[in-house]
Image: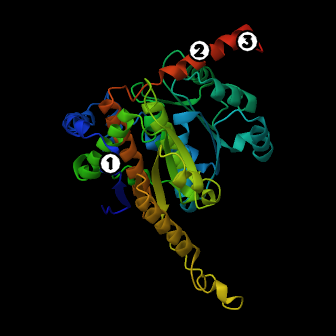
Amino acid sequence: MIKKNLITENFIQERYLAKNLKKKLSSKFNKIYKNLKKDINNTQNIFNVLNNNYNFNFNFKDLKYFLKFKSIIIVGMGGSILGSNAIFEFLNSKLKKKVYFIDDIDTDNIKILQNKHNVKNTLFIIISKSGNTLETLSNIFSFKIFRKKGKNKNIILISERNHNTLNNLGKNLRLFHIEHKKHIGGRYSVLSEVGIVPAYLMGVNVKKLRRNLTKYLHKDKSFLQESTIKLTNILLQKKFNSLIFLNFHPKLNSFLMWYQQLFAESLGKEGKGMLPVISNVPKDFHSLLQLYLDGPKDKLFHIFYYEGDTKKKINTKNFSNDLNYLNNKSLNQVKAAQKNALIKVLKKKKIPFRFFNIKKFEEETLGELFSYFMIETAIIGKLLKINPFNQPAVEQLKIHTKKLLIKGRKNYF
């Protein structure tokens, strides 16, 4: 099925699907799909973020002051930062600014950034929906970026406007604060203030990024419908344990980390779900392919591919005749041959997979990818009769961690 920016194909064979579920899921899909189209116009719904007239909690003119910063450090965790990281990596060849991401407790990384950057000349974007994210707070106070009231002209906070640490800090130090909408969860927030503010300040054309967001709700319904029904069917049967993202291009790695969280946190509950694993190929062909092709048949594959347009050729004519098959070939041709061979073997062995061919590393393509997987994941969750927007098990860990820090205990046991 050919798109302008994307080619999508589905090779999940009927043999893996329960026939008795097909009609039920198809009927449910139509109802969910119809409601989702309505949700886009509801300003209190998560999917309002896909609306062309989405109302941001900031004015772009108020961000112009921050455009002067050539270095940006973004601090957050999970959905607060994965989206902007994906945007930067996907569009990096177009961007002129230096952007760094702090999304883990890594003291060495903080030391390196502290030594490399003058705090006053660096823009910090600090994002936490709750305003109380432990790792984010630990990192920003470890970095020592805050100065006296009114002196912090290089800091942007994005959090909810309620009684939370970041919001209170913003008030006390007169920091530039942008409200994070309560009804938009972190992993669905990339196209809201959370992703658009960093994207704009990186130099991304955010109008183009948001251009094709409703494409799969108005024009291209067929692939979405087929995929959601088949994936839900597979998830209900619990025959597959892993979803392997076979990534053919390094620019897609951060996007796949965003998708990994979206899939795992939205659908991994009530005993349901699959483990999403990012596998970089062709590198992993030399370590994991044997297992993928000849191991347990408990894996579903998603192939993410970019053709590329490198014209530089390989020259082997002055060496060995054994290398004639490589002569005058580009590295992209080598990778294309590997991709085609992989698809041929997967089909021959009747291993289920989906194929996503990225035609252009442009804003419209990335916006389309974000919106498609958000819509698909939410529909699958509703078909599974689970809430795709919460993460109750994660909240338990947060509660226990805070209790242990308050008590000052080193060991839980």
Quick one: 61 or 243, which is closer to the camera?
A: 243
**Res 66 → quadrant:** top right
Whole-angstrom CA distance, mark 3 to mark 2, is: 17 Å
Q: Secondary structure at mark 2?
A: helix
Front residue (pair 324, 211): 324
- Residue matched to label 3: 413
Q: Residue at x 58, y 74 (%)?
A: 331
Q: Which disc, if any, is residue 47?
A: none
User: Split into 4 quadrants, where in the image is the C terminus?
Assistant: top right
Q: Is residue 149 left or right of residue 156?
A: right
| Colouring mode (rainbow / by chain / secondary structure / one colour) | rainbow
- Three-letter amino acid code of the residue under disc 3: Phe
Earlier sequence position, callout 3 versus callout 2:
2
Closer to the eye: label 1 or 2: 1
Q: Nearer the viewer, residue 35 or 355?
A: 355
The foreground one among 202 and 345 is 345
Residue position marked by numbered label 1 in the rendering: 15
Q: Position of residue 249 (x, y in %)?
A: 55, 60
Q: Amino acid at mark 2?
A: Ile
Q: Which element is circle 1 on?
A: helix
Tell me where residue 52 sits by quadrant: top left
* Residue 216 falls left or right of residue 192: left
Q: Residue furthest bottom?
A: 318
Answer few, some or many: residues within 10 Å of disc 1's Cα (few below 14, many 20 plus, some between 14 and 19): few
Q: Check whether the beta carbons of the residues at disc 1 and disc 2 lie within 8 A of each other.
A: no
Q: Which residue is mark 2?
A: 399
- Residue 33 point in image, percent of width and height: 23, 38
Which one is closest to the eye, mark 1 or mark 3?
1
Between the C-alphas of marks 1 and 2, the distance is 44 Å
Q: Position of residue 63 (x, y in %)?
A: 51, 42
Amino acid type for the residue under numbered disc 1:
Arg
